[in-house]
Amino acid sequence: MNPVIVVEGRDDTRRLREIYPDIETIETNGSAIDEETIALIQKALQTREVIVFTDPDYPGTRIRNIIQERVPGVKHAFIEREEAVRKDNHKSLGVEHASTEAIQRALESVHEISTETGEPVISQATLMALGFIGRPDSATRRQKVADFLKIGHTNGKQFSKRLQLFGITEEQLRAALEAVLENEEKMNEIKDIATPKRTREIMERHGLTVKKSLGQNFLIEPNILTRMLEVAGVDKTTNVIEIGPGIGALTERLAREAKQVLAFEIDGRLLPVLDETLAPYDNVTVVHRDILDVDLEQVIGEHFDINEPLLVVANLPYYITTPIIMNLLESKLPIDGFAMMMQKEVAQRMTAEPNSKAYGSLTIAIQYFCEASIGFIVPKTVFNPAPNVDSAILVLKRRENPLVEVKDEAKFFALVKNSFVQRRKTLWNNLAKAYVGNGHTKESLAAALEAAGIDPSRRAETLTIEEFARLSDAL
Ligand code: SAM
């Protein structure tokens, strides 16, 4: 029997006729369906099969619901949102944009909607146990299973109603969920580079050996990347700079979860590897450069809209951790935050408190610009090759204004550096060596210390950043 298709407008009819030249349609012409159209559909249903095929958006769903209510007995065909999006303009959605295969698939798997009411067949407790409600990822899970079952997108409340309407049994729902999860697992397996097997396979295929001199320790544990992206706060609104993409383990995850990624890699041997591992993504640019040699302001200006959030996320080459970070901080680039893997001891120095062994000039340099914390500790066993020491993720959030206000930044940083030259000596010893005869006398140095209210017999590691700032201004 030749069905009649209810569509929203002329474009849909035209599109369907490209595939089925003789097809008959009834056009609703907008979301306020009139009595005449309802009467037409009722009449068609007396002798023909009628399939409602509206757009997968709110107006389309509204028309569908009105027709279902007024003319029970019609059948329904659904198309997924991604299939109905216009390729060159993602804001435009409609059946007319869908591919021939998608339209054929939809019309071949029509549903009859049951109008029986009563208690939901699948209980809330079951839906909760299956993760369709009550979990952070429930909405995504519902959407994927709804797509799989071709029952259209719904919110939480509508989901169980929709299952009932379409007569989906608990068994069918469980089977659909299993299929969706299995598929997801397969996708992850294919995509994750950070596994021992995939890393080995990629390196062997490209005949790669690691260069220790470039700090090449590749991550082989995907969970570390998941947590890293979490503490970094990466999402589809953020642009990311990566330093040292290696074979693409972190880059690939960033490509999936960030807006745009710009990665700097010094080792030319890795470029063909990255070409291959990042091939599925059009939001990644790899630049073959030494990060310490790049005019970052220019490159960043070329690649990103500087009004959008910008993060640095990287598993750093450990031999140049400090210069990389200091360059980025001193550059005054519009970077909002950093999440960087580094040697654990270095991360501890950057987050240290006064009166601790780890507290020093690096602590002050970092905390002057940023709020610093350790995201989590990373054992050495999750790298290939394993480094000699454990690592940590350092998380930095740039302060709007430096932690302390000083008259002369360069003088402040020089003072901090000079104070820590010999940690075991007193502040007086270190400062006298650096300043007396060098623009200062013993008396003027003592006067500055007194003006700042600092006892010269203290050691540098006992001074807070505020005290260093006071002393710098008094010098
Ligand atoms: N991101 C990869 C991962 O997590 O598995 C690799 C990280 S590995 C610790 C450091 C990477 O930085 C290596 O790929 C290395 O070649 C690269 N690298 C070393 N020095 C660099 C420099 N000066 N500029 C840019 N990249 C550099």
Image: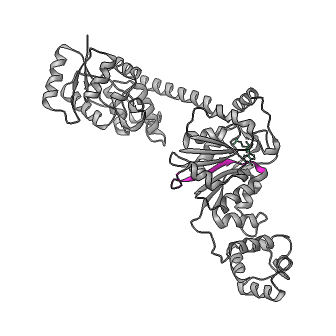
Residue 400 position (above or below residue 107): below
Q: Position of residue 189 (x, y in %)?
A: 62, 29
**Location of residue 341 with respect to 12 vertically, above or below:** below
Q: Is residue 342 visible?
A: yes
Q: Is residue 78 left or right of residue 228?
A: left
At horizontal 13% and vertical 25% (from top left) the residue drawn is: 39
Name the residue: 23% across, 28% down: 68
- Span colored in magenta: 305-318
Q: Is residue 44 above or below residue 439?
A: above
Quadrant where the C terminus sits is: bottom right
Please name whichever residue, 393 or 96, is drawn nearer the observer in this view of the structure. 96
Residue 227, percent across and down?
62, 45
Image quarter hosting the N terminus:
top left
Q: Residue at x 80, y 75 (%)?
A: 459
| Above or below for 291 versus 52 | below
Q: Is residue 359 visible?
A: no
